[in-house]
Amino acid sequence: MSAQAHPSAGSRNTYDYVIVGGGTAGLTVGDRLSESGKFTVLVIEYGRLEPDGFVPGQTTYNITSAPIAGLNNRTFPVDVGCIVGGSSAVNGKIFQRGSAADYNIWGELGGSKRARTTTWNWDNILGYFKKGIQITPPKPEIPAAFNLAYDTQYWGRNTSNHSIFATFGNTIPPTAFPMYQAIKQIPGMNIPPDGGAGEIGMMYGMTSTDPRTGARSYSRTGHWDGLNRENYELITATRVNKVVFDGKRAVGVQVTPRDGQKPSFLVRAKKEVILAAGAIHTPQILQLSGVGPADLLRRAKIPVVEDLPGVGSNFQDHTFVPEVTFRLNSPLPVPPALAEAASAIVPDNLGATSLGVAVGLPIISPSRFESIAASLESQPASKYLPKDSHPSVVAGYQQQKRLYAREMRSLGLSFLRIAVTSALSGSDSSILTWQPINIHPASRGTVLIDPSQPEAEPVVDYRTASNPVDLTIVLESLEFMRRLMATVNATEVIPGPDVTDLTAWLREKTIPYVYHPVGTAPKMPREWGGVVDEELRVYGVKGLRVVDASIMPTTVGATTSMTVYAIAEKVCCIISSFLLRDRIN
């Protein structure tokens, strides 16, 4: 079979593995499970095989959120990839990892109360980052000129053409250097040996760019194009309506061609159905299949296969303020030698190297971090969740709050992320416009089917700022940025001195997403609202696994695509170990 997508049906009606979603995780899993040639694999994608890029309503789904009470009842587009390659085909290509604390929290939350050990931690998952991602170092003159630190021991160096590339750009604005020097002086500021070393602080970043062509490096280019495997197929423009069960075992999926010209049909899976439809559509498919909160399913007149209250809960995304602006009262002092060195770097098609900062709460708010942590810790967990939240979901949120409160007192987990080079990139060099990101919000939303029209797009409720701790942290982040900008002799323009009620201003300006939806089928104990176990198998049923961003119990302090690749690589190794064990037994 050549690397052509079937428009409406695979060449078979039964496969060993049927993967729902041809995005970041789905194509990675499809590649890895088919590479031995021993298993047949079908990937089913609602989007089409077309050029990458963000085109709202064409390469993304057309979904509008529910009104968000904490943001003055505003609604927002929910832009997730609707294209082969998924969100890796339409994102901004900013390629980051979370910190060691992010992944260690996943281990502490666990996938089963009975599990005494976990392999979901930084030390373990680093190997899967290295397996799936290949580094492209910058031109030699850039690290010397700009103090750029990187260490190839944290990255893979396979030479396969079918790789996902993490690439340093080969230009950088000279004004990044004086900002680097100013940020370096902040008490407690860390400078990691590499942006992927598991530490937070000030670091240079990469993009998901193919160093040979300058084109986007994403799941389609890394895990589909040119593979030409007879046992690896892709259906496009096709909707998965539901997982089909025989009792409690998933035996296949019911699908409908997107154009509506052909009737629904069944595709069977001999070994497993793997949901990789993302944090918005994986919970919807589970609910339509009868796996989810029983009360919701009954209201939608869907037969209950498994009462799993956590499906669609625990929804998270990073939030940001789109414009915090300062005017420099004098130009940033760029040393002449540095300006000369930067001008000598010839721009190419790899773009610019970015400089960013990720900091913990003790640095953001030295005088208040303890009281903020204590406030989060002492909250009744049910108070800031939807009123009808199941006790297990409440219990899981309590555990998450406990861990976040602990990390608020440390320097290992970031609660603010800012992009320095983006702030410097405006047409007026005297204006710096920041977009501070609340990278670990405490608020939790939901993604649930509408019982009155369950086949329609799910109801996406971000519930941003439903936990008041989030607004407190953003207010403290603004004060942090004011202190930073005072060191470079800058005057605040936005929000500015005329805005006296900053909380009201934040409710009007905050955006509830950074296109990083996660958490709606979390890897946690079932007693804590979990949906999947340590091997990402769905509780209470057989032959069904989830492999995408929805399994993240808490979000990571970074863009999410690199972590999704690592999740996919790790789970394929888990599946392979089970297959080997079965052969031995």
Image (tube, rainbow, N blue to C red):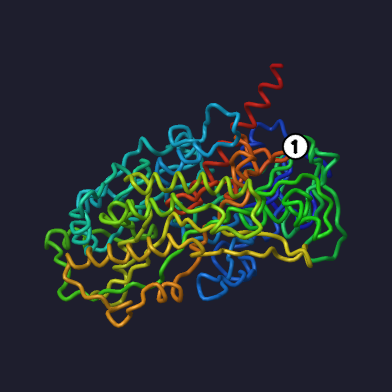
- Total of numbered circles in the picture? 1
| Image quadrant where one finds the C terminus | top right
- Of residues 47 and 69, the one drawn nearer to the viewer in this rendering: 69
Left or right: 549 in relation to 127: right
In the current view of this chain or complex, which residue is farthest to the left?
336
Q: Residue at x 72, y 50 (%)?
A: 292
Q: Nearer the viewer, residue 80 or 508?
A: 508
For numbered disc 1, what is the local secondary structure?
loop
Q: Residue furthest toward the right?
A: 263
Is residue 209 visible in the rendered image? The answer is no
Against 511, residue 244 (above or below) is above
Relative to residue 65, is residue 267 drawn left or right? right
The residue pinned by badge 1 equals 543
Quadrant of res 572: top right
> Image check: 415 left or right of 332?
right
Mark 1 neighbour density, 10 Å: few (under 14) some (14–19) many (20 or more): some
- The x, y position of residue 27, in whole percent, is 62, 47
What amino acid type should be assigned to the residue bearing mark 1?
A: Gly
State the residue in front, 306 or 336. Answer: 306
Residue 533 position (above or below residue 422):
above
Q: Find residue 412 and report its horizontal and vertical position in percent.
A: 35, 44
Residue at (56, 61) in percent of width and height:
52
Residue 458: give x, y in percent of width and height: 69, 63
Quadrant location of residue 162?
top right
Q: Is residue 337 visible?
A: yes
Which residue sits at x=46%, y=45%?
A: 402
Spot occupied by residue 275 in the image (x, y as percentages of width and height): 68, 47
Name the residue at the bottom extreme.
498
Q: Quadrant of the N terminus?
A: top right
